[in-house]
Amino acid sequence: MDYKEIYTFLNGDLKKIEDELERALQAETPVLKEASLHYLRAGGKRIRPIFVLLAAKFGDYDFEKVKPVAVSLELIHMASLIHDDVIDNADLRRGRPTIKAKWGNRIAMYTGDFILARSLELITEIEDAEFHRILADTLVDLSIGEIEQIRDKYNFDQNLRTYLRRIKRKTALLIAVSCLLGAKVARADEYCQRKLYRYGYFSGMAFQITDDILDFTSTKEKLGKPAGEDLIQGNITLPVLFALRDQSLNREIRKVNGKADPEAFQEIVERIKAAGAVEEAQKVAELYVRKALQALDDLPDNETKPLLREMVLFIGNRKF
Ligand code: 2DE
Ligand code: MG
Ligand code: MG
Ligand code: MG
Ligand code: MG
């Protein structure tokens, strides 16, 4: 994706979002401020704020109105990742030690809570009950998605539907809602809101499937976060679901548990790749990319559409 093009198009608004994120994370307690800013400054793709701003372009774009929405959604995302790193016991994120690694689980949990609270504080600027309901419902789904993931750990009998429902909740809905709320705050018409929501939802599905593929195919260095841990930790992702269809691989995969010997585990991973399971998963990601592009096609033509097209193509092919 050409970030420069998006930056130019948004005419400095993304920089202002960045400044606002920093302002939102100011705290009197030094450790809270340090931990939050440590994480913020590690960067990130800022996909959710970009979606909020671009979706708002389909209505009456007023930066002062969309700003709190864009900032809030990135803060919610940040809070969820800080908690996620505790749950996943991850020591690296965006190429830096996680809050959990640097300050421990307790500080990490409260920093996540603090950032979530800040996001709620900012969003009070929006006086629209429906808006808050949508956001709250999304947070409920996010939590359910993560709980389901814990419930389904090492469950090798789960099916594709279970997987798709889980990634919808843990990832796709927040991205869909970024598009929807951006469109809503700019008072884009109902039709645009619906199509943008669909676009965001399909993009979000593609996003998590690529995340799950990269866990298999990439490295810690390229991702800036641990790779190859989903399966060891019992998270049955799409490549694994496809590999489980092979009888002999199925027997091998079932032996995986948290204490698997690293060499034996690596061999299973290689076999999963050799079985073409990653390519199959990639095809599903591409299907979602196509669905997102279709939703986009139904929207009125404007100068924003090509950028949304680039966003989802980037998401479907991303390497980090
Ligand atoms: C990332 O999945 C999942 C993110 C959702 C986390 C949601 C939580 C509920 P991954 P990576 C923890 C709590 C929500 C709040 C506080 C708003 O595959 O590979 O683990 O990047 O992502 O670690
Ligand atoms: Mg994680
Ligand atoms: Mg996780
Ligand atoms: Mg992941
Ligand atoms: Mg991971």
Image (tube, rainbow, N blue to C red):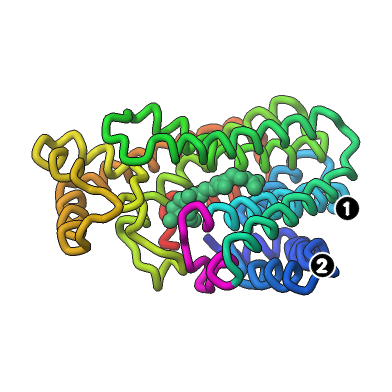
Amino acid type at image mark 1 = Glu
Depth check: give the residue in front, 111 or 213. 111
Residue 21's disc number: none
Of labels 1 and 2, earlier in sequence is: 2
The boundaries of the magenta stretch are 85-102
Relative side of 110 to 298, left or right: right
Q: Nearer the viewer, mark 1 or mark 2?
A: 2
Q: Position of residue 198 (x, y in %)?
A: 58, 32
Residue 309 is at least partly visible in this image: no
Residue at the spot x=21%, y=37% of the render?
A: 244
Which type of secondary structure does the marked residue at label 1 adopt? helix
Q: Residues within 10 Å of mark 1 (few under 14, many from 20)?
A: few
Residue at the spot x=74%, y=38% of the render?
A: 181
Residue 64's disc number: 1
The residue indicated by pointer 2 is: 26
- Whether 219 is among the magenta residues is no
Q: Residues within 10 Å of mark 2 (few under 14, many from 20)?
A: some
